Amino acid sequence: MTPPDPLLGELAAIKWLLVFIAACALGILAAFVMMVVNATGAMKENLRGARFQARNVEVEQLLASGRSLAAKSAALDWLKSEPHRVEAHWALARAHYQLGELSEAKQVVNAVLTIAPEEHYRVNDWLDLLDAQFSQRRPKPVG
């Protein structure tokens, strides 16, 4: 019978080999989970982008065809689902403007500044346009 020392040495080597294999397997599993999470996030972002594009095209087509009430309804639905989407606010403002609802358009345009202060240049241009429209619609003094 052989002494147990060489056998114990081989068992220790096998144990460390198994530990190394288990660590590699955990590393591969962690990398796989990270890839799945990243792919899922990218797919969700693409879906959001596609939804945004579809809503934007829908509202633009409704406005271009003169269907202002339908555009307003679509913009309101868009705004309910994405209240912080600046483009949804602009779409609603354009629908109000096309309907002649200038004060409502002004309120929506002002709300854009609370969401996206960097839009101030566009907001100021629209407010100037709306103010010009307001002044043209005011009754002229008689006499």
Image: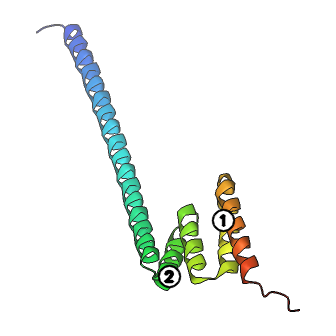
Where residue 10 sits: x, y (%)? 21, 13
CA–CA distance in space, label 2 to label 1: 18 Å
Residue at 69 percent across and 72 percent down: it is 130
Determine which residue is flagged by label 2.
68
Determine which residue is flagged by label 1.
126
Residue 85 seen by the camera: no
Q: Is residue 45 above or below residue 104?
A: above
Residue at 24 percent across and 14 percent down: it is 8
Three-letter code, disc 2:
Ser
Q: Nearer the viewer, residue 37 or 11?
A: 37
Q: Secondary structure at mark 1?
A: helix
Q: Is residue 38 above or below residue 73?
A: above
Q: Is residue 62 left or right of residue 13?
A: right
Q: Is residue 77 above or below residue 47?
A: below
Where residue 97 sits: x, y (%)? 60, 77
- For marks 2 and 1, the one nearer the N-term is 2
Q: Nearer the viewer, residue 135 or 62?
A: 135
Q: Is residue 103 left or right of residue 41?
A: right
